[in-house]
Amino acid sequence: ADLVAVRSDKRFDGLFDPEAPQFNVEAAVVRRVDLLRTYADSNPKDLQPEAELAHALMALGRNEEAVDRAARTLTRAAYGDGPFKHLDHKSWLMDLRSQALARMGRYQEALAQLEQAAKPDSKGDADADQVLDLGSFYCNLGRADDSLAAAQSATGLNDYGKGVQAYVQHCAALLKHDTALAERMLAFLREHKKGNQGPLLFALLRGNHMDEAAKSILESLAAVDRRNSMLVELQDYLGSKALPGGE
């Protein structure tokens, strides 16, 4: 992400050679994959490097490898001898596996994995990030009611989480042609745009508010504390094909 930010910021033109090996983004990800794989293989009961490895593999388009490796790791965590480190990364690893499955066009498997990740634990607590990701995925599948139900069930949200929740509700409202709800969610995002530029921008784009979206992008690019994150967000990355709900 740091390399992408530097290479996409015109202010740094002339200060480095973009063709130099150390500024090659793909080569950097390949090196990271090799390092993470070595560390993960040496620490088979640590879920954190496995989750980071899955993320890096997906950045290279190695989705099948990410899916298979994550499945083996999750099986070990479920049935292997403990104790395992960073068990809090289990739901994130399931989430990443779901994303990789979606990128391969295996949408029903991706949904099943994400539904599992969003299930409450033995204490009745569910990971809010996974619940909101599930709500977003439902919306992208065109399942508005399921999307709303998932978003509304998310609890313990910080300010950014509330912004993502509003975005998911806005997405579902557009599918349901519920103009009133869509406007309420968009108004919430506008009012709380500090720290929620991403959810606001995506909502504006979904709602076809292109002039306001362009203004939001320009404002972020002009802000010292938001320029890099916006530049990184605007680049093209490997992903999945558009789903029925529009993303």
Image (spheres, helix red, strand yellow):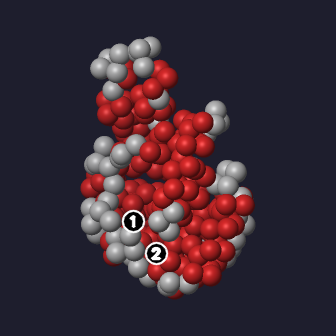
**Rendered view: 94 above or below 16:** below
Q: Helix, strand, or loop for circle 1?
A: loop
Q: Which residue appears at 60% of the width and 36% of the height?
A: 222
Residue 227 left/right relative to 233? right
Q: Amino acid at mark 2?
A: Cys
Residue holding disc 1: 247
Question: Looking at the picture, how far across and down is residue 137, in whole percent?
Answer: 45, 70
Residue 19 found in image quarter:
top left
Question: Looking at the picture, how far across and down is residue 204, in whole percent?
Answer: 53, 62
Give the CA distance from mark 2 to mark 1: 9 Å
Q: Which residue appears at 46% of the width and 75% of the height?
A: 139
Marks 2 & 1, CB-CB < 8 Å contact: yes
Question: Looking at the picture, how far across and down is residue 151, in whole percent?
Answer: 60, 75
Residue 155 left/right relative to 233? right
Q: Earlier in the sequence, mark 2 or mark 1?
A: 2
Residue holding disc 2: 139
Residue 83 left/right relative to 93? right
- Identify the image quadrant of the C terminus: bottom left
Q: Which residue appears at 58% of the width and 67% of the height?
A: 167
- Residue sitting farthest toward the front: 211
Q: Residues within 10 Å of mark 1 (few under 14, many from 20)?
A: some
Question: Looking at the picture, how far across and down is residue 111, in whole percent?
Answer: 40, 73
**Rendered view: 220 above or below 76:** above
Q: Amino acid at mark 1?
A: Glu
Q: Which residue appears at 69% of the width and 71% of the height?
A: 155
Q: Is residue 72 at least partly visible in the picture?
A: no
Q: Helix, strand, or loop for circle 2?
A: helix
Residue 25 or residue 85, whichever sits in front: 25
Residue 87 found in image quarter:
bottom right
